[in-house]
Amino acid sequence: MAVADVYDALISDRPYKSGLPHNEAVEVILAGRGTQFDPQLIDAFSEIHVTFQSIAKQFSDRDMHESFISGRSLRGFSGMFHRD
């Protein structure tokens, strides 16, 4: 989870900083191999980082915000917040 959390923090815009592009975020994470992150996890991440990018695009805060503002439904989110 730490790798996913750091990836999200790196690519996300914040009031105090702009998010990094995917490739730069990947470089930062790979640089943490053996110091900040377990080497085996980073080896796995290096093989699937494109999947991280795809998921981030699919669930980006910007897209969600624009969907709420425009009244469009959020694909994949219907029922997510519904409780029986």
Image (cartoon, helix red, strand yellow):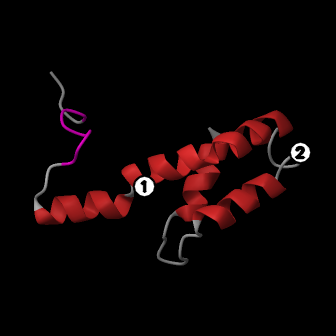
Q: Secondary structure at mark 1?
A: helix
User: Residue 74: x, y in percent?
Assistant: 21, 48
Asked if residue 1 lies left or right of residue 15, the reply is: right
Asked if one can make out residue 40 in the rendered structure from this viewpoint, the answer is yes
Q: Which residue is depicted at the point 82% across and 38% down?
A: 38
Quadrant in which the C terminus is drawn: top left
- Relative to 25, residue 18 above or below: below
Give the amino acid at mark 1.
Lys
Asked if residue 84 lies left or right of residue 46, the reply is: left
User: Residue 31: x, y in percent?
Assistant: 83, 57
Asked if residue 84 lies left or right of residue 80, the reply is: left
Magenta stretch encompasses residue 11 = no
Secondary structure predominantly adopted by residues drawn in magenta? loop
**Residue 2: assigned label:** none
Q: Which residue is mark 2?
A: 34
Q: Which residue is depicted at the point 15% across and 49% down?
A: 73
Q: Which residue is depicted at the point 78% across and 53% down?
A: 30
Magenta-colored span? 74-80
Q: Secondary structure at mark 2?
A: loop
- Relative to 40, residue 53 above or below: below
Residue in front for this viewpoint, 40 or 15:
40
Q: Which residue is mark 1?
A: 57
Report, in whole angstroms, how far the alpha carbon at label 2 lies from the one at label 1: 28 Å
Q: Quadrant of residue 24?
A: bottom right
User: Residue 72: x, y in percent?
Assistant: 13, 56
Label 2 vs label 1, nearer the camera:
1
Q: Quadrant of residue 62?
A: bottom left
Asked if residue 19 lies left or right of residue 33, the reply is: left
Q: Which residue is depicted at the point 25% across and 34% down?
A: 80
Which residue occupies the extreme right position in the image? 34
Count of residue discs: 2
Give the amino acid at mark 2.
Gly
